[in-house]
Image: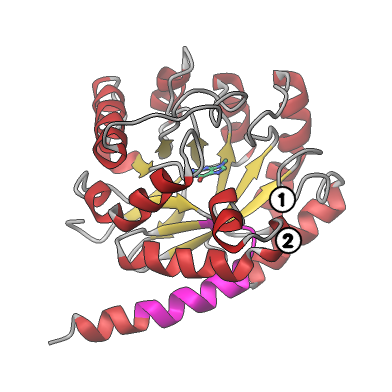
Amino acid sequence: MGAVPIVECAGKLLDLSRPRVMGILNITPDSFSDGGDFLSFDSAMEQAQRMVEEGAAIIDVGGESTRPGAPAVSETEELDRVLPIIEGISHNLSVPISIDTSKPNVMRAAVAAGAGLINDVLALQTPGAVEAVADLNVPVCLMHMQGEPRTMQKNPCYGDVVSEVKSFLARRVDCCILAGIPRDHLLVDPGFGFGKTLDHNLALLRDLQEITELDLPLLVGLSRKSMIGALLDEPVNNRMFGSLAAAVLAVERGARIIRTHDVKPTVDALAVSTALFRLNNKS
Ligand code: 9MG
């Protein structure tokens, strides 16, 4: 990446001069790892505060599960889940808040409530989403997915997964810029586990540096995902160490934000790998 990016999230700064951790806060009954854990306002706020104390630079609030097969959630239900928490975090904690949604009206309401970044697993392909983000004047993370959450793991198919993901992201970047979203409001994400087999995910992790050629901050989510489970043969709650190894490998290959459930362990792992990276780049 050229200049050291500082991403402005509705007045709050996200300094990406070193790799940062995005803490996951799912206000859902059915997310694959923390589903049901933070449905009450108090438990969600406690978790947000804990993640900030542990070093999260940004909190990603989601009200609809994107795990394979998850049922769709209505706009009203999604808003009821996320808005009180976004308001609570925005009034009580100083970190930027990201809203994990693909619905333009949820994007608008979330930003009005205090969110400063849009995290869209559909890369703003929902009708009205590009226009919403252009109006809102906040940054957005564009993620790659093949298919849609309900069926995406049925038979993912690519010729060359890395170049196809890269060119999809490049097309979405062009579309955003054409709609008036400034380039310095864009982040990209290859979407580990979204319409990808284990081999596809491994190829993407190995060659992640190719995605950095888009010259935009790179966000990745690997935390407790099925690719880690498949490599370790471990259930969701036993995948933290594998997720940390993957996070370090991703940062070495240019990732700037790691989206994770396990904030403190990830912050520590990145501190060690970043120190070595700095030393290697001194001489
Ligand atoms: C919402 N969500 C679930 N997994 C994700 C990932 O890998 N990246 C991003 N940006 N969002 C995700």
Quadrant position of residue 206: bottom left
Residue 108 in magenta? no
| Residue 10 in sight here | no
- Tell me the element at label 2: helix
- Residue depicted at 79% across the width and 60% down the height: 46
Which mark is drawn over residue 33?
1
- Tell me the element at label 1: loop
| Residue 177 against residue 38 in the figure, above or below | above
- Residue depicted at 17% across the width and 56% down the height: 2
Location of residue 174 in the rendering, given as x and y in whole percent from the top left corner = 23, 26
Point out the residue furthest to the top here: 127
- Residue depicted at 59% across the width and 74% down the height: 265
Q: How far apart are marks 2 and 1 (CA)?
A: 7 Å
Point out the residue furthest to the left here: 283
Front one among 181 and 124 = 124
Please state, as top left, top right, bottom left or bottom right, where the C terminus lies in the image: bottom left
Q: Do the residues labelled 2 and 1 touch (CB within 8 Å)?
A: yes
Horizontal arrangement in the rendering, residue 66 relative to residue 212 (left or right): right
| Residue 68 in sight here | yes
Horizontal arrangement in the rendering, residue 144 relative to residue 42 (left or right): left
Give the main secondary structure, helix, strand or loop, of the magenta stretch.
Answer: helix
- Residue depicted at 17% across the width and 85% down the height: 282
| Residue 88 against residue 95 in the figure, above or below | above
Q: Which of the marked residues, 2 or 1, is nearer the chain's N terminus?
A: 1
Q: Name the residue under label 2.
A: 237
Q: What stretch is highlighted in magenta?
A: 259-274
Location of residue 112 in the rendering, given as x and y in whole percent from the top left corner = 60, 32
Q: Look at label 1 and name its amino acid.
A: Ser
Location of residue 129 in the rendering, given as x and y in whole percent from the top left corner = 46, 20
Q: Look at label 2 and name its amino acid.
A: Asn
